[in-house]
Image (cartoon, rainbow, N blue to C red):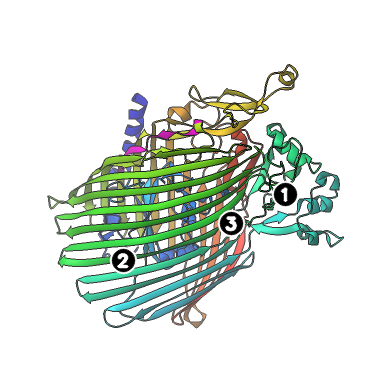
């Protein structure tokens, strides 16, 4: 307790020192008019339109112009901008999505039965899952990333923060249009176009669309072809070639053995919005959008293979072709893989002793596409009525539908040890009604929120390594109701104000799970129904003080929560489990400062989070039970899970001595052991923008957080969370006037840094050191002609790093997979506005 209080005191003291010292920096600087210097950004983080610098919340707000200058196109790119935040494309096993973490609290599992810890809102419509959340930033007005719990105004699953995406709105006053073409490395072709069309004095239509196509940066290699090319044909055994055409050229070159690619992009999107103002105090906006994503699976390479962890079935599978499941299937180049999403062992094949290839017509011969297939569309309406000059009524309704299929094969070889086909549908409806007012001495908002969804997951998991096929048929039907109120009161005319908010939420999720295991002769089915639910009162309190027209300091405390959870992937009855939801209280001190005639903007924050309820899952193993309920034979022994609570287990292979002495061996399967491990997190953040002279813009941000919990601190290996503690970014650009044809030339350089990661609790072998990335861009702009051309390079110094690791060896399987991020790529962009 003393250490905890010491951390709180240190964090708040540091933030206080920053805040107290800040006025000295600009005590001789008069308040500049809002039109001068760094421009204001209007945000809706309080559910009202406010200037970001007057809003007592830690916000990173990025305009569409800033996104374009940096060449950022999707939500996953926000990592390069936001301190103490990480947005990463999810691993192929989890389908197309983005894992999100803010201030050390995050989630990465895209299963629609799980709840994220960062809430997404797109034009006031709640988006409930990580699956499909890598939104293309098409016609975005700005993006707000709110750090810290936002439970009172953004509600469910905003434990870590919220991402609020605000699109551009139709304009009644002028016609406009644009066309943008990007070409680049890996046959990249991106086309974006849009127009705004007034249809009268009070009606306007805005339409935009995007087409993105790029070949993957990872090559899929024909294993046998490659072994021949390398001069080691004996390593290929009798593994058949994937494509006979790859052997047609007797003089092998590196590309001769390429049979496909991973990591590519194939996306089409369209968005239309119509606004109608039948009266000066009434505005109705109706928006529809459609996204089709058939992108290739993420790049995925095998980093390690341990044959001692092979199952008997795996040894028989590879032995069928006269090879071993070992290091020969590591390509040595992270941008290549031997994975082909193909099972060359035909249906009905009998391999003696094999419990999967046993002659059944449904076992073997699968060939599936190495891409996802996502359709994500929605329609929404927003009505704003000005009841008086300072009171608005806002009504919002939205419907969205997601259909998605993704395939994942986990072994990185031309054979098959496990392949999953996942089909997900999720339809949901959102409604919100709110009143808001701004009266000089008080700003207030009150409202009601409703959300319901109907989701279904069907998955087929072929597991030759265990001899099983699993059929998952799971439904998820969440319903959320809430009422809320928030107000900022200014009782004195001295810059002092107080903020308070409450939200009462009634959340539940009706879940029905079925895990049918095809075993011979008697299939088994794990079925259970569960309804996680919570009735929660979230609150926020704050005190704010305006030191001057351009300086705000504030202190706040707020709460956040997620629903109780459950194991969404039980493999046998012993794995049916529920656990409590997350709950936290976060304390924050901050300052927002515009100084030196608004040529320098500095936003600072220090925070301390008391993570009161924190369910965690420890990866372990247990004995595989056969149809008779008894442990299945194998080559492993059950042992206690190191550094884990009593009752947690894992497995290890039998030693030669144990085998010779007759110690029985068993087969094992993965299992998650759930426990509650409260934690504390403290940290600091700084964001700065400067325009020291006309034409020159500098920006930067720095974040640090420290996570502490007994289950982490007492760990013998990697006593830390996997997320980086440090994050930083900086950018510089200078606009050169007076270029030919009345143009401007703007070079820009961006740098971002992510600290070290520790993805495993069992080994340091896969710890990833901190790394820096550099992007650069050069833009020639002819504003009078409405024409601009840009050339850029991402990952300028070709840094190799991994977005994700899939460390299957931690759960007793043979391999470790890594998802290498994209290497250096160049692009050329041409944009014409009308």
For discs 2 and 3, the disc positioned in front in the rendered view? 2
Q: Calculate the distance from the C-alpha at mark 3 to the C-alpha at mark 1.
A: 31 Å
| Residue 238 higher or lower than 666, as above or below | below
Do the residues under discs 2 and 3 have CB atoms within 8 angstroms? no
Which residue carries the number 2 mark?
Answer: 381
Secondary element at image label 2? strand
Kindly identify the residue that appears in the image at 46 percent across and 59 percent down: 135
The tag earlier along the polypeptide, 1 or 2, is 2
Do the residues under discs 1 and 2 have CB atoms within 8 angstroms? no
Kindly identify the residue that appears in the image at 33 percent across and 49 percent down: 479
Crowd around label 2: few <14 · some 14–19 · many ≥20 (10 Å): many
Which residue carries the number 1 mark?
Answer: 414
Which residue carries the number 3 mark?
Answer: 795
Magenta stretch? 574-589
Give residue 818's mark: none
The C terminus is located in which quarter? bottom left
Crowd around label 1: few <14 · some 14–19 · many ≥20 (10 Å): many
Residue 586 belongs to magenta span? yes
| Residue 10 higher or lower than 476, as above or below | above
Q: Is residue 159 visible?
A: no
In the visual, does 321 lie left or right of 144? right
Residue 699 belongs to magenta span? no
């Amino acid at each position: 307790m003393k250490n905890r209080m010491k951390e709180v005191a240190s964090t708040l003291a540091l933030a206080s020192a920053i805040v107290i010292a800040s006025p000295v920096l600009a005590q001789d600087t008069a308040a500049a008019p809002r039109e001068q210097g760094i421009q204001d950004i209007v945000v809706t983080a309080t559910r009202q339109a406010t200037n970001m610098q007057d809003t007592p919340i830690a916000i990173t707000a990025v305009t569409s112009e800033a996104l374009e200058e940096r060449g950022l196109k999707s939500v996953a790119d926000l990592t390069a901008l936001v301190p103490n935040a990480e947005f990463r494309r999810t691993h192929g096993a989890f389908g197309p999505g983005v894992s999100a973490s803010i201030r050390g609290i995050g989630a990465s599992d895209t299963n629609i039965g799980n709840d994220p810890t960062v809430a997404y809102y797109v034009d006031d419509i709640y988006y409930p899952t990580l699956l499909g959340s890598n939104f293309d930033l098409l016609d975005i007005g700005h993006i707000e990333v709110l750090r810290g719990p936002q439970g009172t105004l953004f509600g469910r699953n905003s434990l870590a923060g919220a991402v609020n995406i605000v699109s551009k709105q139709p304009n009644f006053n002028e016609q406009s249009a644009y066309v943008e073409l990007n070409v680049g490395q890996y046959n990249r072709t991106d086309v974006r176009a849009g127009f705004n069309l007034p249809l009268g004095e009070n009606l306007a239509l805005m339409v935009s669309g995007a087409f993105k196509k790029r070949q993957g940066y990872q090559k899929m290699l024909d294993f046998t072809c490659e072994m021949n090319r390398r001069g080691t044909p004996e390593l290929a055994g009798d593994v058949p070639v994937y494509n006979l055409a790859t052997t047609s050229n007797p003089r092998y070159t590196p590309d001769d053995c390429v049979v496909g690619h991973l990591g590519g992009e194939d996306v089409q999107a369209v968005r239309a919005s119509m606004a109608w103002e039948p009266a000066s105090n009434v505005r109705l906006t109706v928006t529809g959008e459609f996204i089709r994503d058939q992108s290739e699976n993420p790049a995925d390479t095998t980093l390690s293979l341990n044959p001692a962890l092979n199952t008997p079935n795996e040894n028989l599978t590879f032995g069928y072709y006269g090879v071993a499941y070992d290091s020969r299937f590591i390509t040595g180049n992270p941008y290549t893989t031997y994975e082909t999403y193909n099972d060359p062992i035909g249906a009905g094949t009998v391999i003696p002793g094999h419990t999967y290839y046993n002659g059944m017509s449904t076992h073997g011969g699968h060939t599936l596409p190495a891409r996802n297939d996502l359709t994500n569309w929605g329609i929404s309406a927003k009505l704003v009525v000005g009841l008086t000059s300072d009171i608005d009524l806002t009504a919002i309704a939205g419907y969205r539908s997601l259909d998605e299929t993704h395939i994942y094969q986990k072994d990185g070889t031309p054979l098959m040890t496990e392949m999953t086909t996942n089909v997900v549908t999720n339809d949901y409806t959102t409604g919100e009604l709110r009143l808001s007012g701004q009266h000089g001495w008080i700003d207030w908002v009150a409202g009601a929120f409703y959300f319901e969804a109907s989701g279904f997951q069907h998955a087929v998991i072929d597991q030759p390594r265990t001899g099983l096929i699993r059929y998952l048929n799971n439904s998820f039907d969440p319903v959320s109701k809430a009422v809320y109120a928030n107000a900022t009161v200014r009782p004195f005319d001295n810059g002092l104000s107080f903020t308070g908010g409450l939200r009462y939420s009634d959340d539940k999720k009706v879940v029905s799970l079925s895990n049918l295991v095809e075993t011979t002769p008697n299939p088994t089915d794990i079925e259970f129904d569960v309804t996680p639910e919570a009735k929660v009162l979230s609150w926020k309190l704050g005190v704010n003080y305006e030191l001057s027209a351009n300086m705000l300091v504030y202190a706040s405390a707020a709460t956040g929560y997620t629903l109780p959870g459950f194991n969404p992937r039980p493999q046998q009855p012993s794995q049916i489990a529920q656990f409590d939801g997350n709950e936290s209280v976060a304390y924050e001190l901050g300052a927002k400062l515009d100084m030196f005639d608004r040529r320098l903007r500095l936003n600072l924050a220090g925070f301390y989070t008391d993570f009161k309820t924190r369910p965690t899952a420890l990866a372990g193993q247990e004995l595989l039970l056969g149809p008779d309920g008894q442990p299945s034979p194998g080559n492993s022994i059950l042992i206690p899970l190191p550094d884990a609570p009593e009752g947690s287990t894992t497995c290890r292979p039998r030693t030669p001595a144990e085998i010779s002495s007759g110690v029985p061996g068993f087969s094992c399967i993965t299992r998650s052991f759930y426990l509650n491990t409260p934690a504390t997190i403290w940290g600091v953040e700084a964001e700065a923008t400067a325009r020291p002279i006309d034409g020159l813009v500098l920006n930067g941000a720095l974040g640090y957080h420290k996570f502490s919990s007994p289950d982490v601190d007492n760990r013998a290996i990697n006593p830390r969370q996997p997320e980086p503690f440090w994050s930083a970014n900086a950018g510089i650009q200078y606009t050169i006037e007076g270029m030919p044809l009345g143009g401007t030339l703007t070079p820009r350089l961006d740098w971002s840094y992510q600290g070290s990661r520790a993805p495993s609790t069992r080994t340091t072998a896969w710890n990833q050191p901190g790394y820096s990335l550099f992007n650069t861009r050069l833009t020639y702009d002819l504003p009078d002609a409405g024409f601009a051309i840009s050339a850029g390079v991402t990952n300028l110094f070709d840094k190799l790093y991994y977005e994700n690791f899939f460390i299957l060896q931690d759960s007793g399987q043979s391999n470790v997979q890594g998802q290498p991020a994209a290497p250096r790529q160049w692009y050329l962009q041409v944009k014409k506005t009308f």
